[in-house]
Image (cartoon, rainbow, N blue to C red):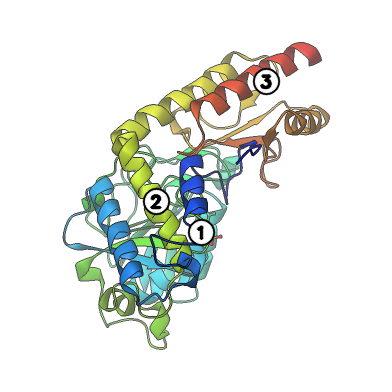
Amino acid sequence: MKVSRVYNFSAGPAVLPESVLREAAEEMLDYKGTGMSVMEMSHRSKAYDTIIKEAEADLRELMNIPDNYKVLFLQGGANLQFAMIPMNLMKNKVADYIVTGQWAKKAYNEAKLYGTVNKIASSEDKTFSYIPDCSDLNISENADYVYICENNTIYGTKFKELPNTKGKTLVSDVSSCFLSEPVDVSKYGLIYGGVQKNIGPAGVVVAIIREDLVTDDTLPGTPTMMKYKTHVDAKSLYNTPPAYGIYICGKVFKWLKAQGGLEKMKEINDKKAALLYDFLDQSNMFKGTVVKEDRSIMNVPFVTGNDELDAKFIKESEKAGFVNLKGHRSVGGMRASIYNAMPMEGVEKLVDFMKKFEEENA
Ligand SMILES: *Cc1c(COP(=O)(O)O)cnc(C)c1O
């Protein structure tokens, strides 16, 4: 099949490994001799049971998930988790939030519907361009959990060190850094993320939750579908799950294993990010918008400082086959999202294009 693919720097839904897409295409009409697509298959069938179980097993292996954590494939996007988290975890109706961007802020505002929510740190004073010092925060004595957004997709910042929660449960939104590097799951009570950034198609949320946090003791009125326990008890098959999306996630997990796992991905991701940041740091035209120590290796925002020049760059880059480089409307400028599936070659070519643009427009 002859196709023409662009370099897609979208923040999400985002680029997926080409080999995964090709495999899915090959299996589209007849999945492993079943005579049907995974889209047409009962989620209670034997074939699908194997798909979802393998997906979970591969994710457990990749992330080295301890046995006392449950893995859930959910729906509703990261946004539904903004409500599910307080509804399930707010036993004392108190939670502490660290607000490092719009997604954390949305989660914070949603949690306010359910209890007392303290903003214990924020970087809003400087357009979320850094991660606040979280080594000695004023953690609330009766906080049910401390909440962070670990990689801030819009602003391009990343927690390089987890906050000191002083023994409280840590809840983390990892939507845009999921599987980009090794992680010590045991440091968290709950890690979750929408898969459409770094793993698969929109429609699936993966939540990894410590066993003891899964209880029947949810806030009054919590819908059955919004209790973690419902999905834990039914092994993510309480109702029809986003079956095709989970199948693609499973393929990406296998792809990641074949790449050499998360250690290897971090090595590659560090290299890709360094290539782009090193160029930005020496450029006279382009510059990064984030404090160096807090730079994300997944989302790289940059500006020229001139709106017209930004617009020209976005237009010309698109013509050259680099798409979705326009920054989020709240930051402006450009943003290159360089997730796991963006090949090194894509970043190399982008940097070459930026060099040329700088020369031609100096
Ligand atoms: C994209 C994103 C979200 C929102 O995800 P939805 O699935 O659209 O609800 C939340 N948090 C982070 C960090 C994101 O990047």
Q: Are marks 1 and 2 in contact (CB under 8 Å)?
A: no
Rendered-image quadrant of the N terminus: top right
Q: Secondary structure at mark 3?
A: helix
Residue 353, label in figure? none
Res. 288 visible in picture:
yes
Residue that label 3 marks: 354
Identity, as a three-letter code, of the amino acid under mark 1? Met
Mark 3 burial class by Cα count in 10 Å: few <14, some 14-19, many 20+:
many
Residue 64 falls left or right of residue 246 = left
Q: Nearer the viewer, residue 34 or 206?
A: 34
Mark 1 burial class by Cα count in 10 Å: few <14, some 14-19, many 20+:
some
Rendered-image quadrant of the C terminus: top right
Q: Secondary structure at mark 2?
A: helix
Res. 362 visible in picture:
no
Identity, as a three-letter code, of the amino acid under mark 3? Met
Residue that label 1 marks: 28
Question: Can you name the residue that lies furthest to the bottom here?
Answer: 221
Q: Which of the marked residues, 1 or 3, is nearer the chain's N terminus?
A: 1
